[in-house]
Image (spheres, helix red, strand yellow):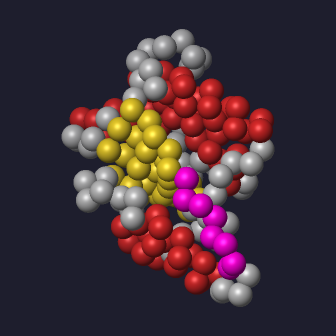
Amino acid sequence: MRVKLIVVGKTSEAYLQEGEKEYENRLRRFVSFDQVVIPELKGVKSLSVEQVKQKESDLILKQFAASDYVILLDEKGREFTSQGFSNFFDKKGLQGVSSLVFVVGGAFGFHEKVYARSNEKLALSKMTYSHQMVRLIFKEQLYRAFTISKGHPYHHS
């Protein structure tokens, strides 16, 4: 299985960058993992929120292959326990899904075109996190899910 994370804008805080790199390295023992960074749009002060979301969506949609199973990280999405998230990956593998693509949108969320292309939505929590922190939290949970599946002692039930 291949897992890709698409994010809008780069991580600017060094401590978050370090954490992300740590979990990316750990993940590679279990799964093919890639991250695509969509550059933040320049000169958007004169644009409406809807126009910004539209422009970001065009860049995001270019990253999808027809066969990708797309999951948006969205506050209105389905929530999992860590064990449930691990089971989710196991099920997708059994269903023959070979490419899971997770997307963290920009500051204003997703345009309807991205929602229309997605297969489902996932919420990491009912709490709100910064877009930069979501990346680290997601990668840690992704790593945890694979360690649970493989019986690795990282997760304590």
Quarter of the image for the N terminus: give it: top left
**In the displayed structure, would residue 122 be above or below residue 144?**
below
Number of numbered discs on residues = 0
Q: Is residue 74 visible?
A: no
Q: Is residue 51 visible?
A: yes
Residue at the image point whose x is 59% and y is 29% from the top: 23
Residue at the image point whose x is 67% and y is 72% from the top: 42
The foreground one among 61 and 153 is: 61
Residue at the image point whose x is 59% and y is 83% from the top: 50
User: Is residue 94 shown in magenta?
Assistant: no
14 displayed left or right of 99: right
The location of residue 65, given as percent across then percent down, is 30, 57
**In the displayed structure, would residue 1 be above or below residue 146?**
below
The location of residue 70, given as percent across then percent down, is 38, 55
The foreground one among 139 and 128 is: 139
Q: Main secondary structure of the magenta part?
A: loop
The location of residue 92, given as percent across then percent down, is 31, 40
The foreground one among 121 and 69 is: 69
42 displayed left or right of 7: right
Residue at the image point whose x is 50% and y is 50% from the top: 36
The segment highlighted magenta reads: 37-44
Quarter of the image for the C terminus: give it: top right
77 displayed left or right of 130: left
User: Is residue 42 shown in magenta?
Assistant: yes
In the displayed orientation, state which residue is furthest to the front. 42
The location of residue 81, given as percent across then percent down, is 54, 37
**In the displayed structure, would residue 44 be above or below residue 78?**
below
